[in-house]
Amino acid sequence: MAAGTPRVFVSHLSGVPVFDPNGDQVGRVRDLVAMLRVGGKPPRLLGMVVEVVSRRRIFLPMTRVTGVESGQVITTGVVNMRRFEQRPTERLILGEFLDRRVRLAETDEEVTVLDVSIQQLPARRDWEIDKCFVRKGRGGALRRKGETLTVEWSAVKDFSLEETGQGAESLVATFEKLRPTDVANALHHLTPKRRAEVAAALDDDRLADVLEELPEDDQVEIIGKLKEERAADVLEAMDPDDAADLLSELPEEDKERLLTLMRPDDAADVRRLMSYEERTAGGLMTTEPIILRPDATVADALARVRQSDLSPALAAQVYVCRSPDDTPTGKYLGTVHFQRLLRDPPFTLVSSIVDSDLVPLPPETPLPVVTSYLAAYNLVSVPVVDASGSLVGAVTVDDVLDHLLPDDWRETEFHGEEGIAGGR
């Protein structure tokens, strides 16, 4: 771990308030959710169980936690209010880890887990459990006798999954080290029954990433076997253009039911994308490019570009628009490319360095024209602007490739035997 990265013991988080960015209390932390991994690797922290005012317990993903500070947790403000349901691969840290009897790997001595600490990985938004606070000797957490010590997670046994297991839980733990495209390839080669088991065990964000890499038939099969509320959660976690493509393959009644269950803002983005012809700029685009107002600075732009959940294609440029700065925006003013951001001082206003010469594409632009445009100007992303001059989205080169490659391109050898074997 990088020096200076804060470590938090989970017992200190029990009952602490959770606030949105405006300072309004969302609820209180009641537990933390982790996923075990194979080979003694520290468990990955997935999120928190938060009890809201109605006493309903909901799941707050760590990707939506912006701060874990003394006596409080800060969120992005986007919280799903559906009731928390624990999945097979998930473990509750306060409820299942603390007061548990385990053994020290070096001496095989039995100890009791009194607490565990979590730490954020450097330069990433991921969190994992890194240390255990244990008491030697027999007896529960309330017993005062016995030496206490803090050890690395790898120093204790009886927690991690076995490498040789082939249940969904072990498969998910094995997949944890793979890229989404490699997990998708492995999933594609599983039996439908095992594929459904693994999909049910993956967390929403991970399953969303994997679904985006699967063939349409596999996507439809998997989403159709999930509970409807879970399916809506996964669709919300997907890129809007990928969610729209998937929903367009479903029967009309299923499509409408899932859209109704989704958050209104997410559903609105998807509905707008589905209103365009599939093989056009509007049908290909994402509605979530990086958008800045004219008074934003280069420093603001670089901070947005650094966000780890952005694809390289989306992080390659920012789009400058008048308010509102969610699609569809106010008037589109131009594009600032990443290389230009690196050349100008941090205090420079993005409005002073926009590239306004590059003509944006209208939503009805057909795929061959979009492809030629990207190739002619050596771009990885292009803005899509409607007749009123508002930015409605951006088409990235990976979206174009998905529609140009043959349907069976995932069967090609570039995945390699290692990627496939790692998921079986």
Image (cartoon, rainbow, N blue to C red):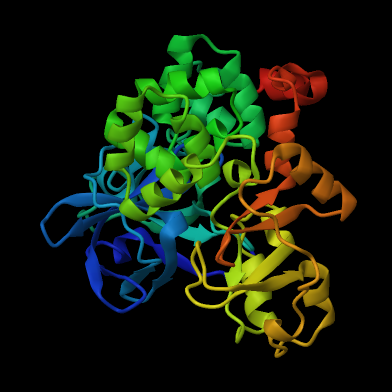
Q: Farthest left residue?
A: 54
**Number of marks in picture:** 0
| Quadrant, the C terminus | top right
Report whether residue 40 is seen: no
Report whether residue 254 is seen: yes
Using residue 381 as the reference point, say whether residue 178 is left or right of it. Answer: left
Using residue 345 as the reference point, say whether residue 93 is left or right of it. Answer: left
Q: What residue do we see at 50% from left, 24% from top? A: 219
Depth check: 111 or 70 in front? Answer: 70
Using residue 351 as the reference point, say whether residue 271 is left or right of it. Answer: left
Q: What residue do we see at 71% from left, 60% from top? A: 360
| Quadrant, the N terminus | bottom right
User: Percent position (x, y) of residue 96?
Assistant: 29, 41
User: Percent position (x, y) of residue 342?
Assistant: 81, 76
Depth check: 242 or 65 in front? Answer: 242
Q: What residue do we see at 75% from left, 27% from top? A: 405
Residue 278 higher or lower than 4, as above or below: above
> In the picture, residue 55 is in which quadrant?
bottom left
Using residue 179 as the reference point, say whether residue 274 is left or right of it. Answer: left
